[in-house]
Image: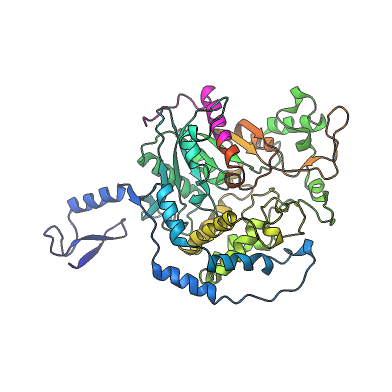
Amino acid sequence: MPMLRCFAIPNLSWIQLLPDQSPLVSPRMPSTSILNDIQEQLDTVQPYSMHVSSRYLELTNKKLQLTRLPREIELPEHQKWVQGTPKSVLEPLLDYWLEHYDWRTQEALFNSTLPQYRTTITLPSTLGTSTLQSLRVHFIHKRSKDKNAIPLLFCHSWPSSFIEVQKIIDALVDPHTLPSFGTGAHQAFHLVVPSIPGFGFSDASLDDGFGLRDTAKLFHELMIRLGYEYYVCHGSGGFNICRAIALSHPKSCLAVHTTNPSFTEPSFTQSPLSFLKYRIAKCTRARIPLLSFGYTPAEVQWSKARASDVSGASGVPLYAHRPAVGSTLSRFYSLRPQTLSFSLCDSPVGLLASMLDIMHARLPVKTQLGPRSRSPLLAPGEAEMQDAPQGGLANGYEGPRRERKMLTDMRQLQWLPGPEGSLRWLRRAHADSSPGTPFQMSYCTVPLGISSFQARSSSSSSNNKHGEEKDNKAATSPPVMWGSSSWNLAWVKRHQRRATVAAWEAADLVVLDVRECFGTLLSHRAMGNLPLQAG
């Protein structure tokens, strides 16, 4: 086999070149034509299939076998999560990962159902120098056969991954797989789902300052490379990435859709009109349609104190508003990534336990489990104390095999590349979106659509004879209309079904809402005259 030679090429990192005997290879520096060929090859979008080394899978299995679990004290059922992930929850998932989970089967499934690609994108360094960084970006790209399909950029966030889209991808690309009626019922999409650098099979950035703004630029460049000059965005956990794209590229990003966003209360200094509308709606309890301005009676009754006062049978609050500073767990994940990486990079069970704690803080529950550490996965103001489904994480996770497989898939995709890159990104993303930053205070003119699957505290509530809600029935999350102070809020739909990770828990409704939202905005020309790319 001929020996391969590598050259240090400015701005292109280390790149493997031609066989040694090729007359085109210079012993010192490649010619301009070779550099151009290399750059052209880097710009090319290449099909990609997952294939993890068997040695690495064997190492993972050995680490799972050698796990030493800590001893824990006995706590009442409603307080079992108060110190973190309980052993009774983790052990069944550890056994499943070790004895039943087959990565090769999942790998083949993803390769056959999710059309994957990789391409190299070069961006300026965040260090303020002339240095460039080249990152290989992994993404899903599935085109629709519909000639009127709209390019849709789907953004995930930490600690999720690109497989978050697996339940909704087919129905978004081909409307016939999930028939519906009404506006946008037949709207199709060309779907692009990139992995954030450091997540899944995308290269991690080595720049400390790589955060939301650079991720937005990277994703925009990817859409342009794929031929999509104009597109729309969807993101639930990835909502901040969508906002960064909309703020940076408002001429290309024509609209955004999200689920369960969290906003701060309108202030007079930021948006006098939004402030006055909220005050009027609150004074009238949103019972006068012309003066409700999109608010509902339950939403205007919401308050931090009131939401925290709503208690379950155990007397423990069902909801607690996350303080701006965050709790110990949140700060630990977002501010000390290197320290955390030393433990999580070497222990798949440690990574699993950490992620279970984070996911538990977001899962809807029927029985209160008591106070939990706040998760960096939650945006400021988002509910973090909710009830878990019976048989789910609350009761020593013995849920359906499909759900155990889903959880293990997510953790495997975080374990394989190592958590350090994604944790560094999380630290910068939190800093970029801190309260009071231009990112949070700027008004975004791009139309926003919201699907709300938030719960309402109704344990002791009822309707009166006129069908009106009593005062003890308040929303357990801040009003979605608060977003009007920082967004061009154009479409809102509230659902009775509760869902935190909506693309998993309410996949059908998410698909229908995405179609209706963008279909409505398109029909009302709220997105301008969208030039549709031929399928």
| Image spot of residue 487 (x, y percent) | 60, 35
- In the image, what residue occupies the spot 53% across and 34% down? 178
In the rendered view, tell whether residue 284 sits above or below residue 305: above
Q: Position of residue 294 (x, y in %)?
A: 70, 29
Give the extent of the magenta segment: 512-535
Using the rendered image of the protein, determine whether residue 249 is visible from the camera's viewpoint. no
Is residue 454 in view from this perspective? yes
Q: Is residue 513 left or right of residue 154?
A: right
Q: Is residue 174 magenta?
A: no
Front residue of this view, candidates 147 and 508: 508
Residue 125, quarter of picture: bottom left
Residue lying furthest right in this view? 465
Residue 367 relative to residue 220: left or right: right
Image height check: is 350 above or below 410?
below
Q: Nearer the viewer, residue 292 or 439?
A: 292
**Residue 183 is drawn in which quadrant?**
top right
**Residue drawn at 60 percent across, 37 percent down:** 509
Q: Report the side of 376 relative to 152 (left or right).
A: right
- Quadrant for the N terminus, please: bottom left
Image color mode: rainbow
Count of residue discs: 0
Please check the rendered image and state whether residue 529 is part of the magenta-colored stretch, yes or no: yes
Q: Position of residue 366 (x, y in %)?
A: 75, 51
